Amino acid sequence: MALEDELGPQAVKIYKAMKDMGFLTEDKMGTAERITMGAKLPKNMVMNALQELQAKGYARRKVREKAAGYYLVR
């Protein structure tokens, strides 16, 4: 199945933005703020898309001291 078949349009845009920015491992994860700047979408859309990516197993969230980090797993 293609990525576009499983995810909504905002989630696909966030996925591609995270891939372009290199947020692919736990060592190189990015905050929601950095993903928002890279994707050029409103923060609430980015947060909803990140939740969709997490629910479908494309991304993981790791809680840190100041801000949570997000990275892609597939």
Image: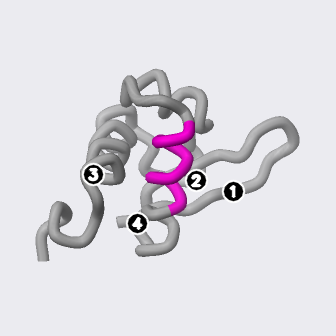
Residue 28 seen from this side = no
Residue range in magenta is 44-51
* Residue identifier under label 3: 12
How packed mark 3 is, by other alpha carbons closer than 10 Å (few <14, some 14-19, many 20 or more), is: some
- In the rendered structure, the answer to whether residue 25 lies left or right of residue 1 reads right
Percent x, y of residue 25: 49, 52
Q: Is residue 5 left or right of residue 71?
A: left
Q: Is 43 included in the stretch rendered in magenta?
A: no
Mark positioned earlier in the residue sequence (4 or 3)? 3
Which residue in the rendered view is the most extreme toward the left? 2
Q: Which corner quadrant holds the N terminus?
A: bottom left
Q: Is residue 12 above or below residue 32?
A: below
Element on which disc 4 rests: loop
Instruction: Classify 10 Å Cα crowding around label 1: few (below 14), some (14-19), many (20 and above).
Output: few
Q: Residue at x 59, y 29 (%)?
A: 33
| Number of the front mark, 1 or 2 | 1
